[in-house]
Amino acid sequence: MRTRETTIEEVGPGIYFVTGPASNWTILAGGDDVTLIDAGYPADLDGVLESIASVAPRQPLRNVLVTHGHSDHIGTIPALVERHHVTVWAAAEEIPNVTREELHQIGVKDLLPKLILPRYLVWMVHAVRSGGLAPIEIRSVSPLVPDAEVTFSGIPLVPRLTAGHTPGHLVFEMPEHGVMVTGDALISGHATSLVSGPQELPAMWHWDAEAAHARAQTFRATTNILLPGHGPAVYPRDSAGRHA
């Protein structure tokens, strides 16, 4: 299924993985309302709203769960709060990053040595045009308890604290469906990467690169369906150990 700027894939009952122009989000619509996991850049608002309307036209959006507070994952949240009065959820350790009391995010000066590579320049131009440097005001965030199962929109899930990419990065495991939303703890493609398939972001992108690497290794061994923050969904390994 496609909208103008997204590709939508149902990976489990009521679980929809949306590949956006630069980052991804997941829609949970297994109950009476809708929950969004991550929310794209500010400029992705139309794509977010269209993707929700295409899979759940009659269910109200009630909650947004955040893997981490980078602008390409929280950018549309202020507009969603204003329009739909959603509740925003994140790990307690990540809330200062989401509300911008602190900022754990790569800046232009960090990218300068890489801009001789065209793919980095193209990525940076897209990020800026998509609102990556714009202020994002999120005033209220509710804390999620790591490792405690909770149900959102009819889907039981378990938030797992995976500090590394940011101080309070979360992944969301849905054990009943064999699905895990990995955010940027493990991705499968990126505009600045020359390879496709399960991979880690380079160290420069991380708050704690060593911790991020250790977390990513655990996801590489899993047989879950992985829904990354960037790149396509990763499906279970086949009998020869290859990703399908």
Image (cartoon, rainbow, N blue to C red):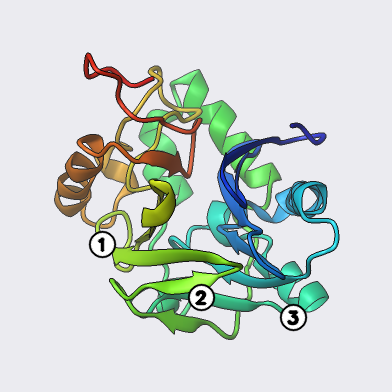
Quick one: SS at disc 2?
A: strand
Q: Given contact means CB atoms under 8 Å apart, are the residues at marks 3 and 2 in contact?
A: no
Are circles 3 and 1 on residues that touch, CB within 8 Å? no
> Closer to the camera: disc 3 or disc 1?
3
- Callout 2: few (<14), some (14-19), or many (20+) C-alpha neighbours within 10 Å? many
Q: Is residue 157 above or below residue 93?
A: above
What amino acid does circle 3 point to? His
- Mark 1 to mark 2: distance in Å? 16 Å
Q: Local crowd at mark 3 within 10 Å, few (<14), some, or many (≥20)?
A: few
Secondary structure of the residue carrying numbered label 3: loop
Residue ID for mark 2: 89
Picture residue at 69% right of the left edge, 56% below the top: 42
Residue 214: tell me if it is visible.
Answer: yes
Asked if 65 appears above or below 128 in the picture, the reply is below
Q: Which residue is mark 3?
A: 85
What amino acid does circle 2 point to?
Answer: Trp
- How far apart marks 3 and 1 lie (CA) works out to 29 Å
- In the image: residue 92, left or right of residue 85: left
Task: Give coordinates of residue 73: x percent, y percent.
Answer: 55, 55
